[in-house]
Image (cartoon, coloured by chain):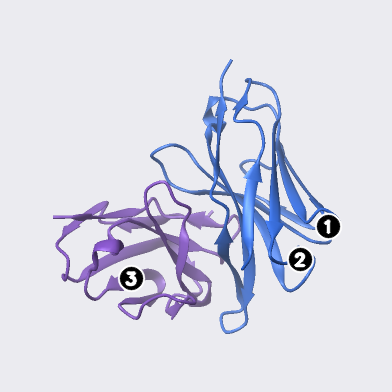
Amino acid sequence: EIVLTQSPGTLSLSPGERATLSCRASQSVSSNYLAWYQQKHGQAPRLLIYGASSRATGIPDRFSGSGSGTDFTLTISRLEPEDFAVYYCQQYDGSPRTFGQGTKVEIK
Amino acid sequence: QVQLQESGPGLVKPSQTLSLTCTVSGGSISSGSYFWSWIRQPAGKGLEWVGRIYSTGSTNYNPSLKSRVTMSVDTSKNQFSLKLSSVTAADTAVYYCARDTYYHDSGSYYSDYWGQGTLVTVSS
């Protein structure tokens, strides 16, 4: 099973700042098969990024994904108040599909 | 707009079978390149993929749960279901159903529509 480790566990930032979230895989993941999800409290996750770098429908361009192999990054260029949430990476390369443990982006 | 809605008992006794149904509206469960997934999340914890089913009944399960999981699909009702047997307190979680769509530019499936989730508690 591919283990995804996200860092940091919590990111404390102010609105307008840049957020950089990391996702490291225990073995190489095809870039095509890495996604990022946003989850707000009490809500279902929402697909943000698929294929490591493609934005899902309706996702603002302040969200961007990058990376390859075992290291992937989600960047939020300028945090808006609605962006404070938990973010998960997920790989679809190996079975079973696995998620990272999440990074919480909180208001500083 | 596709919508998914989970339903089922919120309380299940240990050793019994958890049964949930996901009703899909706004689109046919049989149309298009879709799988239909279950994902769960214990309170305050991360997400765990349980498995997925295609409209033909073809399934993929998480190996850690495979011996206890059964998924089925009822195309006439536009529903798919999850059964998890021999439950323990460790199976207490919010259970989400989701639609997995094939993204041609990526060559893979991603969960792009989710239900709101339903809390299932395992307790006597």
- When asked about the image quadrant of residue B76, the answer is bottom right
Labels 2 & 3 near each other (Cβ < 8 A): no
Q: Which residue is mark 2?
A: B28
Q: Is residue B63 visible?
A: no
The answer to whether marks 2 and 1 mark residues whose Cβ atoms lie closer than 8 Å is yes
Looking at the rendered structure, whether the residues under marks 1 and 3 are on a common chain is answered as no
Q: Assign a secondary structure to mark 3.
A: strand
Task: Please name the amino acid that badge 2 sits on.
Answer: Ser
Name the chain under label 3: A
Kindly identify which residue carries mark 1: B75
Label 1: chain letter: B
Decide which of B43, B8 is in the foreground and name it. B8
Q: In 3D space, how far apart are the residues under numbered discs 2 and 3 (Cα atoms)?
A: 35 Å
Amino acid carrying mark 3 in the image: Thr
- Against A103, residue A42 (above or below) is above
Q: Nearer the viewer, mark 1 or mark 3?
A: 1
Q: Are marks 2 and 1 on the same chain?
A: yes
Mark toward the viewer: 2 or 3: 2
Tint applied to chain B in the drawing:
blue
The purple one among the chains is A
Q: Give the letter of the chain under mark 2.
A: B
Residue type indicated by callout 1: Thr
The image shows residue B120 at horizontal and vertical percentages of 57, 33
How many neighbours does mark 1 have within 10 angstroms: few (below 14), some (14-19), or many (20 or more)?
some
Mark 2 residue element: loop
Residues at marks 2 and 3, common chain? no
Residue drawn at x 41%, y 55% is A100
Can residue A36 be seen? yes
Kindly state the secondary structure of the residue where label 1 is placed: loop
Which quadrant of the figure contains the C terminus of chain B? top right
Mark 3 sits on what residue?
Answer: A73
